[in-house]
Image: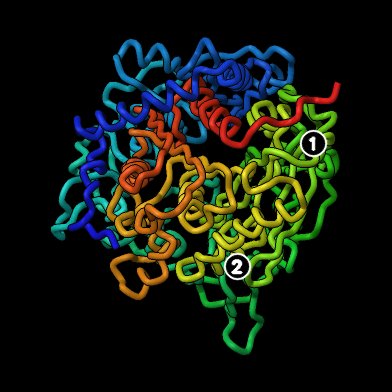
Amino acid sequence: MTSESTDPYLWLEEVTSDSALDWVREHNAPTVDRLTASKRFAEIEEQTLEALDTDDRIPYVRRRGDYLYNFWRDASNTRGLWRRTTLDSYVTDDPEWDVLIDVDELAKSEDENWVWKGATALRPDYRRVLISLSRGGADAAVVREFDLTTRTWVTDGFTLPENKSTVSWIDEDNVYVGTDFGTAPDGHSSLTESGYPRIAKRWTRGTPLDDAVTVFTGEPSDISIRAVYDDTPGFERHFVSRATDFFNSLLFENRDGELVLIDVPTDAYAGVRRDWLLVMTRSEWSPTGPDGPTYAPGTLLTFDYQAYLDGNRDATVLFEPDGHTSLVDFTFTKNYLIITTLHDVHTSITVLTVGDWSSVEIAGLPGLATISVLDTDPDHSDEVFWSATSFTEPPSLLHGTIGSDDATVIKHSPEFFDASAVTTEQYFATSDDGTLIPYFVVRRTDVTSGPTLLYGYGGFENALTPGYLTVAGRAWIERGGIYVIANIRGGGEYGPAWHTVAQKAGRHLVYEDFSSVAKDLVIRRFTTPEQLGAQGGSNGGLLMGVMLTRYPELFGALVCQVPLIDMYRYHLLLAGASWVAEYGNPEDPEEWAFMQPFSPYQNIRRDVDYPPILVTTSTRDDRVHPGHARKLVARLEENGHTVDYYENIEGGHGGAADNKQAAYKSALAYEFLWETLGEAKPPVS
């Protein structure tokens, strides 16, 4: 086992040291030279950038008062424009956009590598906005106040230096803020061990940040603390949330300085909307005690909020899962609740009337599509912006008002590949424990076998649902490759239990599921091990590392992006401590016993024939430390294996700070896969 004292590559964890960056450049050069020289690389990069930059794609919006706001990047505005328009203009083919902030001009004038991170507006007049900007795409951001009336930065406004801060409006002169306040009165850092705010304060305009009044202080071992103000008219309330780990939290209402605990299971999702408390369970729960009803994980319940605080636990069931159906999301409009569910990874929408919770018909939404709610204006109307897409159907944007207007398509994304002869099929592989694992196969109808790319994630209850394959469609499917999405455990495709069964000691199920899909693809003769590639990033990068070290015989190539690799030290690096509830604590011998077999860094061997692997990361990733990727490469090379490596010097956890970088990174991956997995069949003419 590689411990801290015996790890020869700890120096690669020094993110921007001269020696580490020299190592990065030395490893980038041969990869770039080899993979960028072909005509195919140039074509894929050009096609991908064209798709990312095209003016014909949908400019997605959020309503803030009378205006619809959009952030937009294209070839001329690589860093982006924050802009707005009216609904009447937006539904036309050529909306009139009012540009509020030009990030390219801002970056040039301030000589900073600004990347847009979002805007938080003060309701109800939306005159003041808190803008977040990061350097190079990192999670850490600078916060600055902007006046939408004067179109200027507020010179005496709320500003925060670069940090993983939280900030939210109370009123024009007060905000809640969590940031690095330095050493706290208890002698600990004001940040948690995961690097997020541990202390929430109320900060008044015109006063130093040091004078902000503490509202709540968490423990150093917590993930994060946050205070927010609910400005719903007539139901104004202050809340404090304390995340004790990634999946457990405590929620309090702050009533004039007294914190009132909302006593729900810590692993449940809980939220208050007007008179109602909504709770989505993640484990079995009997709110009235052992003699009362027990609700399964993934059930959505509602209670009378004040009655609940007074001890009444009478619940109304809004959604109950079954073996095939799970809750994905729920969203309020003024008078309705929209519930989005998955049935064997296919979307369904239910609309309920708020209060009596009766079902309402919703018209205009397409069938056989992944549908999601993009935006509502719940304090003022029943307006809804919807998105609909599939693997082969580009996204469409629908707009309507529940109860009066059907949802109608107001924007279409263009087609980026010829889907007329592309088919999507769903299959089920049998995992090692007998569980059926769904997966989707997307291919040209004339392609029955050949180079196949298997994508997976399997963590944090994130479900992989069908969505338009803008890049893969052009770079892989249209060129004759077979594309596969695996809905393995660890995700949320079948509700919380699909995830919780694969936490910690159950982590092996994630890897058994993915390997079972790989085997099933060969059994069904879609491909061979030599022509089967796999790709994943972040937690999916860990998945690729495990496939490399435990299942190398199943694959002809792997693309491992911004990965977790050294699970013995992951909790000590950047945000790693926040994921202990997912993976386990390596400092606990009992937990390290089930983690060690699946920690790629500790399982690299000299005498194993590993498939070709491309490892990519970003220097500016301040979520998953780039040292993971670097150390994987170094350890593989130490053991005599050849590796392709590319590290973007900026880009954050997404790996790219702009569309050009994203296209370049994507083209590297697809060129690597085509080179290693072999040529596919040309289209039938």
Residue at image position (53%, 77%) is 311
Residue at image position (21%, 57%) is 4
| Of the two numbered discs 2 and 1 in the rendering, the one whose residue sits closer to the viewer | 1
Q: Residue furthest front?
A: 607
Check disc 1 and give the amino acid type.
Val
User: Where the C terminus falls, by quadrant?
Assistant: top right
The residue lying toward the viewer, choosing from 616 and 68, is: 616
The residue at which mark 1 appears reads as: 447
The residue at which mark 2 appears reads as: 497
Looking at the image, residue 434 sits to the left or right of residue 627; the answer is right
Residue 243 can be seen in this image: no
Looking at the image, residue 229 sits to the left or right of residue 602; the answer is right
408 w.r.t. 426: above or below: above
The residue lying toward the viewer, choosing from 507 and 168, is: 507
Q: Residue furthest bottom?
A: 291
559 w.r.t. 58: above or below: below
Residue at image position (54%, 47%) is 232
